[in-house]
Amino acid sequence: MATQSKIVILGAGGRDFHNFNTVYRGDNSVRVVAFTATQIPNIENRRYPASLAGPLYPEGIPIRPEADLPAIVAENGPLNVIFAYSDVSHEYVMHRASWAMALGCNFTLLGPSATAIPSRIPVVAVCAVRTGAGKSQTSRRVVELLTARGLKVVVVRHPMPYGELERQGVQRFATFDDLVKADCTIEEREEYEPHLERGSIVFAGVDYGAILAEVEKEAQVLLWDGGNNDFPFYKPDLHLVVADPHRPGHEQRYHPGETNFRMADVVIINKETTADYAGIRQVEESIAALNPKAQVVHAASPIFVDKPELIRGKRALVIEDGPTLTHGEMTYGAGVIAAQQFGASTLVDPRPWVTGEMAGTFRNYPKIGTLLPAMGYSPAQIKDMESTINAAECDVVIIATPIDLGRLMTLNKPSVRVRYELEEIGRPKLVDILNDFCAARGL
């Protein structure tokens, strides 16, 4: 025991647990003394439970705030620090590396070869270079095309285990009632509900080895629906990566999105009808420089608005996808585009009315500006968002998050929903690529 290497894993409630499960859980030569947590509110000061940690950790593993790293080092001596979260700049990663090394620690990144689990059934992975690039609509499009071939496709979503971890080892969602029973957050619902509306089954959770064993029992194809800009937890047979010409150059500047970009079999340049040509061209130049063998699909994400007549000439409060505005760093999304297209007179700044945890979100991410991020990691946060919306002096609420917020809160003013789907431009189309993929595997 005295010769064990001590490890701390810096994470955000997802990749960190997966890296532990696949690399360290059964390794008696190492001792993981703690996870740390950041990015997501209220996910620290828990324990990774013994039921998931395995017999080497009968008391589980503490999850502490990332700011506690110096104290963890002081308590345990020099450590191997494993960086295990996503959608941060390369500069950010190296600042964490410098911090760890200044504390006397090593700093390590685990890559796909160490952490991607092989599957007995084909895996199609949808990933991205940044949060908010358009993975969700791409995943839905891939499922639609594979299902049209008569294949049973099961979606496995990147983890969002923000609740009681012991209950979240393996989660299977087939109905909206399943979401309620699991106490899913708004962020989870945003990713699961659109698949459920189309009749797809979604798996998620913490232990992706155990999840895979269940999926292989009922699927012919596994669709990996990635989170943030992380790379897949399963070894992909076809790796699709979405790039965003609204943020050209980010495909080379963010971790681990650049890893995805370099690994991709197919790069989808999305949102082309709302992007400048210079941005599209810059992404094309990045593909030529970093991954010239990748197939390139040009695409748009047209928006669809119910009741657009409620927008024209009105003061609009726009609600966008939360992670896209926070660590995704976007300053607008589909809601702003809808407001512009359908003639809103002005965008209402929600900041005078934010309260509680919503106020904390704006303090942590001051560049959000005149938009309201759909934040709902806890019942209190959902209540604070409801209070903010109802207090705001606006005529209409434009909801551009993928879920029906009416299921979770009561609004006192008219609202419209914005939806978006993937639409390929020219050739090749995804159907061409998937037809070739299926033919090569006899599907």
Image (tube, grey):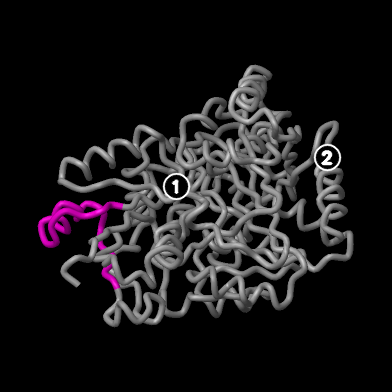
Q: Callout 1: 10 Å neighbours few (<14), some, many (20+)?
A: many
**Left or right: 151 as drawn, with respect to 330:** right
Q: Secondary structure at mark 1?
A: loop
Q: Secondary structure at mark 2?
A: loop
In the figure, residue 166 lies in which quadrant?
A: bottom left
Residue at the disc numbered 2: 429
Residue at 53% x, 45% y is 229
Q: Callout 2: 10 Å neighbours few (<14), some, many (20+)?
A: some
Question: 370 or 259, which lies in front?
Answer: 259
Residue at 77% x, 68% y is 220
Q: Whole-percent x and y of residue 210? A: 55, 75
Question: 129 or 352, which lies in front?
Answer: 129
**Left or right: 272 as drawn, with respect to 436:** left
Q: Magenta region: which residues?
A: 61-81
User: In the rendered structure, which amino acid carries the disc numbered 2?
Assistant: Lys
Q: Which tag, 2 or 1, sits closer to the chain's start?
A: 1
| Mark identifier at residue 65 | none
In the figure, residue 385 lies in which quadrant?
A: bottom left
User: In the rendered structure, which amino acid carries the disc numbered 1?
Assistant: Ser
| Mark identifier at residue 86 | 1
273 in relation to 210, above or below = above
